[in-house]
Image (cartoon, rainbow, N blue to C red):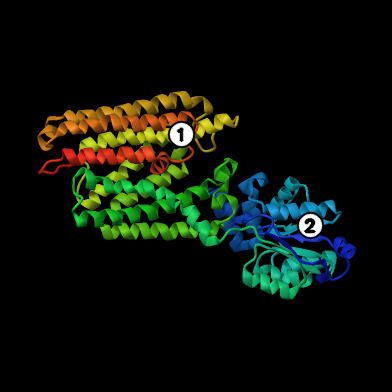
Amino acid sequence: MLTTIAAATLAGTQPERDAVPLCVDLDGTLVRSDTLIECLFALGRRWQVVKGLVRLLTTGKAAFKQCIMQNAALDPALLPYNVELVEYLCTQKAAGRRLVLATASDLGIARAIADHLQLFDEVIASDGVDNLKGEAKASALVRRFGVKGFTYAGDSRSDLVVWSAARSGIIVNATARVAAAARKAVPIEAEIADRSVPARAALRAMRPYQWVKNLLVFVPIFTAHAITEISAWVGAAGIFAAFCATASALYLLNDLLDLGADRRHARKRDRPLASGALPLLVGAALAGLLLCLGIGLATVEGTLTVILIYAAASLGYSIKLKELPLIDVFLLAGLYTLRLFGGGEATGHLLSLWLFGFSSFVFLSLALVKRVEELMVLGRTGGDHVARRGYSAGDVAILQVFGCAAAFASCVVLALFVQDEATIRRYASPGLLWGIVPLVLLWLCRLWLSTARGHMHEDPIVYAARDWVSWLVAVVSLLLLGAAKVATFTSL
């Protein structure tokens, strides 16, 4: 939202205002993020971070910024720019106004951004010696343009001292308290607010719609015919909450590690962390809090080992394993199966080998669905390689073969279970179980057909949760399982 204050409230006439250079802050203003934090996440665990910390302790923050930003190789084209502010600056530039990028970020990254945008006539930034933040920035701008000789666009409390030295100001994505203080300090030329509510952005980043996958922890209750056991439901609910908290923490961490790749993606670029709607440090802190919550719940439930294995495997996937072809899909299938295993541990109804074999093939097929969907989107957009993936567009055909083969293998396992002598002895009407086999095969084939037609735009489990055919298959399968059960309950 852009609100332009009436020109009459500004000091001087319109020509006088236009003659005053417009100095624009970078972090949180021009870019909906912090370039230093962006560089730190881009570096990850590389030794340059340690080197930068040494420089911070020995020579100060300006040298630290210079060290980190010189080694991060941050791509200015991928940063989440404030689109409304950029449009406003384009208008001012077209009117002949002088634009200056004035930032506490290092001069190197500031110049790279200025070169990319082709908007600024001058760059004033930290140079490895002086850290131009707050009073230091105000002094630098006063030396360059004189007291009340410039307009300043900023967003934070540290910008108040700069606004006080300016002729007029522009408020960008500031908190209500900072905005009120800025209005008292200087006449306001414009106010720009395009950032969503932080709490809403945080909730979106947690991806609560993905929690539907964790409903798998309830499956052992049904396969063991234990729907009347209150303790089983309580245990499943506890590990469900633990999986949800841990999964959301790992989604946040994955997004932090994949910022560059997500910003290149047509759909993922709108995620809260990639788009700048959620500050990176807030995302990191929220991830830590959720991980502690998940571990705490698992400790209470007695399933800590399961959650730790899940967290370690997911972390390995986010950092490196997702880049390894086939290893990634087998790991994803394993994470799905781990949810079933955790549900069995929490409810007291452990997975049988039949259920383990059946679910392993099903989840491998679903993991391959996810990869094929990504590669098909890549093919439609003319690309050849998905960032941080070990596949190319030409791998679609062979991955489809793998996925369909896994789908049929799962139904073979299910058919073998149905005709197993132990199953026949344990069910009053075991013939009814045969009806589940074609239903499951129909469901899997339908998922693959939807993928081939380009209708699979999300995780297959999430897709199934919103698909009425999937719900129908699940309900009918449960009815058949219930009708076939016997007095001596056993699990699949």
Q: Is residue 181 visible in this depiction of the protein?
A: yes
Q: Name the kind of residue labelled 1 in the image.
A: Arg
Badge 2 element: strand
- Pointer 2 local density, CA inside 10 Å: few below 14, some 14–19, many at least 20: many
| Comes first in the chain, label 2 or label 1 | 2
Residue drawn at x 26%, y 58% as measured from the top left: 301
Q: Is residue 268 left or right of residue 337?
A: right
User: Closest to the observer: 93 or 480?
Assistant: 480
Task: Give the image location of residue 313, x and y in percent.
Answer: 38, 45
Q: Is residue 261 left or right of residue 158?
A: left
Task: Give the image location of residue 270, x and y in percent.
Answer: 57, 48
The residue identified by callout 1 is 371
Q: Which mark is residue 452?
A: none
The vertical placement of 432 against 134, above or below, is: above
- Pointer 1 local density, CA inside 10 Å: few below 14, some 14–19, many at least 20: many
Badge 1 element: helix
User: Closest to the observer: 411 or 36?
Assistant: 411
The vertical placement of 16 against 340, above or below, is: below
Question: CB atoms at circles 2 and 1 under 8 Å apart?
Answer: no
Task: Give the image location of residue 128, x and y in percent.
Answer: 69, 58
**3D distance between C-alphas at marks 2 and 1:** 45 Å
Residue drawn at x 69%, y 65% as measured from the top left: 133
Q: Is residue 385 visible in this depiction of the protein?
A: no
Q: Is residue 62 left or right of residue 392?
A: right
Task: Give the image location of residue 386, x and y in percent.
Answer: 54, 35
Q: Name the kind of residue labelled 2 in the image.
A: Val
Q: Which mark is residue 100?
A: 2
Q: Residue 29 is drawn in which quadrant?
A: bottom right
Number of the front mark, 2 or 1:
1
**From the image, which quarter does the N terminus lie in?**
bottom right
Q: Is residue 317 left or right of residue 231?
A: right
**From the image, which quarter does the C terminus lie in?**
top left
